[in-house]
Amino acid sequence: MKDIVIVGGGYAGFYTAWKLEKALRRGEARVTVIDPRPAMTYQPFLPEVAAGSVEARHVVISFRRHLRRTRLISGAVTRIDHADRRVTVVAQDGEPFDVPYDIVVVTAGAVTRTFPIPGLLEEAIGMKQVEEAVAIRDHILTAFDRASVLPAGPERRKLLTVTFVGGGFSGVEGFGETLSLAHALLGSYPELSEDDVSFHLVEATHRILPEVGEAAGRWVVDHLRSRGGHVHLDAQLQSAVDGHVVLSTGEEYDSGLIVWVAGNAANPVVTSHTDLPLSPRGYLRVRADLRVEGDDGIIPDAWAAGDDAAVPDLTSSAPGALTVPNAQHAVRQGKRLAKNLVAVLRGGEPEDYVHHTLGVVATLGLGRGIFQYKRIVIRGFAGWVMHRGYHVLAVPTWERKVRVLLIWLSALLGGRDIASLGSLTEPRRAFVTGGVVDAPTGGGARSAGEADLGHAEVGEAR
C-alpha cells in the first residue's frame, strides 16, 4: 500500500485529500496531511469576518470532521527530502521527527510577502488567517469605544484611522468591508462624526484590482472615494514607525491600524528547504498534469499544486503563461490532482489541468460589489449578490454553506453585531488584576491585546 503525504492543508491540499478519500479503494493507499493548523481557512470570507458579516468559526473547515480516513499530523514541515522520500516535521511540542512517504504532494501555500520598511513588522498586521481578520474587527470596534470618550483631536483621529497597504483583492475587499463597518458604527456613536473616521488604501501601481479590466478598476476607485475612502495610487509605504505612515508621495498621517496585504511569496519550505526543482521565481516546476518536472524530465512520485506551484496555463495564448495563484485555481487543481493520483496508482495516465475562468467577484462592503466575466461587468448591489452567491456555493461542505447563510439571514433581520471581543487576547487579565484598572502613563491606554496586534501574523499562510 502506497503512503501519500500531503504537505499543507490549504485549498489544494484539503481538496486533494478530500477527493482521495472518496476515490481510493480500501487498502489502495494511505493518505497523510501535515499542517500546523487544525482546519482549512476559506480566505475569500476573511474581509467579511473583519467586518463582522461572517462568523469566524464558519470560515474554517475542520480536518478531523471532514477527513475521516486521513492521517492528520499537526505540525509544520521544515524540509522535504525527496531523494530519501521523507519530510521533517516540527510540532508545537516534542522533538522534530521524520515522516516517510512513497508519494509526496506539495501544497504548502504562500506566505505574506513583506519588505524591510521601518515599523512595518512592529505595527502592521496581515489578513491571511482568521485570527488576523478577527483582530482587525475587534481593533476597529474597540477603537470606536475609546475614541468616543476623547475630545476631538490627533489622538481620536489616529484611533479612527485605518490603512490598508495593497490594492489586490484582499486589500480592496478588506478596505471596502471595514469602511462599511465604520460608517455603520457611526449611527451608534453620537459622540463621533464622519470627519473623525479616515480610511486609506495604498497601492504602489497606477491601478487596483489588476484581475479586472481597466475601466472596472477605475469605477472601484471612484466608488470607494465617493464613500469617503482615501485611495492613494502610485504610492508606496516608506515608514510606519509608531503608527506614523509616510508615503512615497510625501503624504504623512498617523494610523491606529495598518493592514499589510501587499502580495504573497512562496513558502520557505519550498524556496529553501527541498531538493525538488524550482522555477527561477522560487516555485515548484510542474507540468500541466501537476507532476513535478526537472531538467531531465518528470520527478517520480512528486506532485504539486496551488500557490507554490508554477502551473502552466493552457487556456492562455501567451508563451510560458502560468495560472494565477488564487482560490479558484487551487481548489480545481486539488480536485484534478486527486484524480490524477488515482489514475496513476491504477496504471493509467494523468490528465492536464485546464480551467477557463468563471470570472472574478469582489465585495466592496455591505450591499456593494463587482463581478466581471470577460467584457461583462456587473456593479453595485447586483455585483454584491453575485459575490455572495458564488462564495456560498464555493465554500466546501454543506454544513458550512448552511451556517454562513444563517449568519447572513440573522444579520439581515437583526443588523450587525458590534460587540468587541478584543479582551479574548488576554483572557486572564480580569482574574489577575481583580478588577483593578491602571491609569494610563501617557499617550493613552491601549486596549487589551492591541499591543500585540502587529505581531499577530505568525501562522503559516495558505
Image: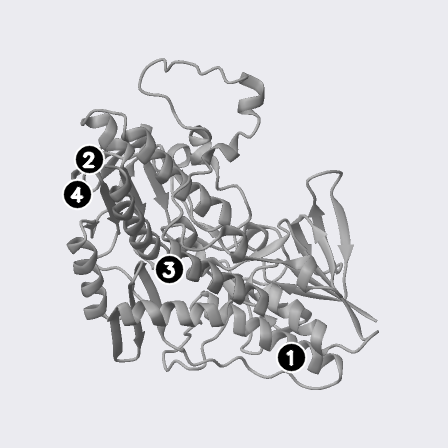
Q: Is residue 101 left or right of residue 201?
A: right
| Residue placed most toward the observer, 362 or 304 | 362
Q: Which element type, helix, strand or loop, lies under badge 1?
A: helix
- On the image, which quarter does residue 7 sit in? bottom right
Q: Which residue is mark 2?
A: 252
Upstream in sequence: badge 1 or badge 2: 2
Q: Nearer the viewer, mark 2 or mark 3?
A: 3
Q: SS of the residue at dot 2? A: strand
The residue wearing badge 3 is: 412
Between marks 3 and 1 in the image, the one whose residue lies nearer the viewer: 3
Q: Secondary structure at mark 4?
A: loop
The three-letter code of the residue at mark 4 reads Thr
Query: What kind of residue is marked 2?
Result: Glu
Quarter of the picture containing the N terminus is bottom right
At a point 41% along the width and 71% down the height, the residue shown is: 389
Q: N-terminal of the two: label 3 or label 1?
A: 1
Measured as percent of width and height from the top left, residue 159 is found at: 29, 32
Distance (Cα) linking label 4 and label 1? 51 Å
Mark 4 and mark 1 lie on one chain; the one further toward the N terminus is 4
User: How many other residues sit within 10 Å of disc 3, few (<14), some (14-19) or many (≥20)?
Assistant: few
